[in-house]
Amino acid sequence: MWYTIETRGSDLMEFAFQETFSAAEVKIIRKKLKLKQRELAELMNVSVKTVERWECGAGEVKGSAAVLLAILREKMWLVEEFEIPEKKLPVRLRYMYNDQLCTIIDVDDPARNVKIKNFVVDPVLRAFGKEEHPSYEDYEAFLESRCFPRTRDKMKIVLRELNLPFYDPFMIIQKTQGRMAEDDFWIQIER
């Protein structure tokens, strides 16, 4: 089967998605994705009990859950694409646009090592634009770009208000989350 939806006027769009999935099909897809029931539930934003019900045949999967299963069955690489990597360096920054995670930035300051993973295609939303392997200097420039300028008039007053002894972009971001008046980007820091 396929989905048909009406668009503007009487135009129809059709999508080649399976409308329902049986218990056996759900289990096969989950195992091919190498996910536990809990992990599939989290990925699909449903409860673990829902996945358990699907897999024991207490109900068929339909609607948006069936569409997502159909996509995952055909594009299994998407799970890895959106998986947040294990934190391997001492500091992790999550570069956000509103509530959307755009880039993970892992940093080892003493070793001057930076690793990133982008979760968006649009370079405007990425922390380093098109750069996939930023240098430590790129990272430092990025941090500074998320702060008020070093040359700001009355900077000492602003630093005093933030309870900071000197201008340090990382420390400023810890206090301000790198929020700027002119955009909706912000940074969450994990240690």
Image (tube, grey):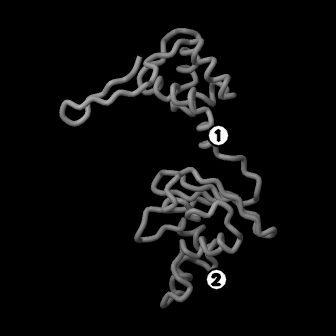
- Crowding around mark 2 (Cα neighbors within 10 Å: few <14, some 14 to 19, many 20+) is few
Q: Position of residue 98 (x, y in %)?
A: 45, 55
Q: Secondary structure at mark 1?
A: helix
Does residue 35 sit above or below 93 in this rendering?
Answer: above
Q: Point out the frontmost of discs 2 and 1.
A: 1
Residue at image point 53% right, 89% down: 151
Does residue 33 sit above or below 89 in this rendering?
Answer: above
Kindly identify the amino acid type of the residue bearing the numbered disc 1. Glu
Q: Secondary structure at mark 2?
A: loop
Taking the image as shown, residue 154 lies to the left or right of residue 25, namely left
The furthest residue to the left: 9
Q: Position of residue 166 (x, y in %)?
A: 63, 83
Does residue 136 sit above or below 31 in this rendering?
Answer: below
Q: Which mark is residue 165?
A: 2
Label 1 sits on residue: 80
Q: CA distance from mark 2 to mark 1?
A: 42 Å
Kindly identify the amino acid type of the residue bearing the numbered disc 2. Pro
Does residue 112 sit above or below 33 in this rendering?
Answer: below
Q: Position of residue 112 (x, y in %)?
A: 77, 69
Number of residue marks: 2
Q: Considering only order in the chain, which callout, 1 or 2, is on the residue closer to the N terminus?
A: 1
